[in-house]
Image (tube, helix red, strand yellow):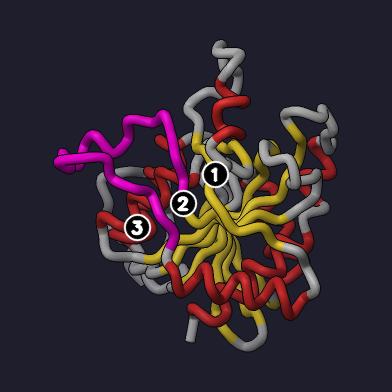
Amino acid sequence: MAILESPSACIAAEEGVIAKAVLMPGDPLRAKFVAEHYLENPVCFNTVRNMLGYTGIYKGRKLSVMGHGMGVPSAGLYAHELYNFYGVDTIIRIGSAGGIGEDVKVRDVVLAMGASTNSHFADQYRFPGQLCATADYGLLKDAAAAAERLGVRADVGQVFTSDQFYNDNPEANATYRKFGILAVEMETAGIYWTAQRFGKRALSILTISDHIFTGEALSAQERQDSFHEMMEIALETAWNAAE
């Protein structure tokens, strides 16, 4: 099979190898974990920049999983290429987030209905107003139903996509909480905007790895290996999308 031509060398995959539905963690090692623990006969289709990508079979249907890196620019780049160069229809982000809401606890699952942000990524679209970064409703509904079947409590609401991991504004997190933000992370808005721009589907499913106000946190190894509930919700949602 011929190698697809693209204006970037960020993904090197043969035509038809990547599934229509792709799970995307930030950490490529989490993509490897999902492939090895949940997919039958996983095949690695990308090692460029160590941004690992795999395709395998889940409950009889072809699914892929690939890392997207940290921050809106990185996530937006990989989402753009998957949607436009590899025929992907659905991206489901599976990532970690910092808890903001009073009722959100470490290890809780959050389904991101929308993402407020301080990113200027959407300026490129010259949209005459403020473009909302929102999830695909069908995916959101399926994920909520999957969580219920699996007996997992999943909070549905708004997250904040930040360009800063270390924010120099000490009042920012309190302001996010005041407006009902459940969690803060760094990629969702970019993926949602990219999906909207190209008429595709996207959803962000997050596990709370630490809480901004309580100080409780998981280790890096725990974040990499222990987000099973989030992964299973995402797999079930992607399975439906792969019909």
Q: Secondary structure at mark 2?
A: strand
Q: Which residues are magenta?
A: 114-135
- Marks 1/2 in contact by CB < 8 Å: the verdict is yes
Q: Amino acid at mark 2?
A: Gly
Q: Which residue is mark 1?
A: 159
Q: Which residue is mark 3?
A: 195
Answer whether residue 116 is magenta in the image.
yes
The quadrant holding residue 217 is top right
Q: What numbered label is drawn on residue 114?
A: 2
Q: Quadrant of the N terminus?
A: bottom left
- Callout 2: few (<14), some (14-19), or many (20+) C-alpha neighbours within 10 Å? many
Q: Report how many numbered discs are placed on residues in the image.
A: 3
Give the camera-side residue of 19 and 242. Answer: 242
- Marks 2/3 in contact by CB < 8 Å: the verdict is no
Residue in the image at 40% along x and 73% along y: 16
Viewer-nearest of labels 2 and 3?
Answer: 2
Whichever of labels 1 and 3 marks the residue nearer the N terminus, that label is: 1
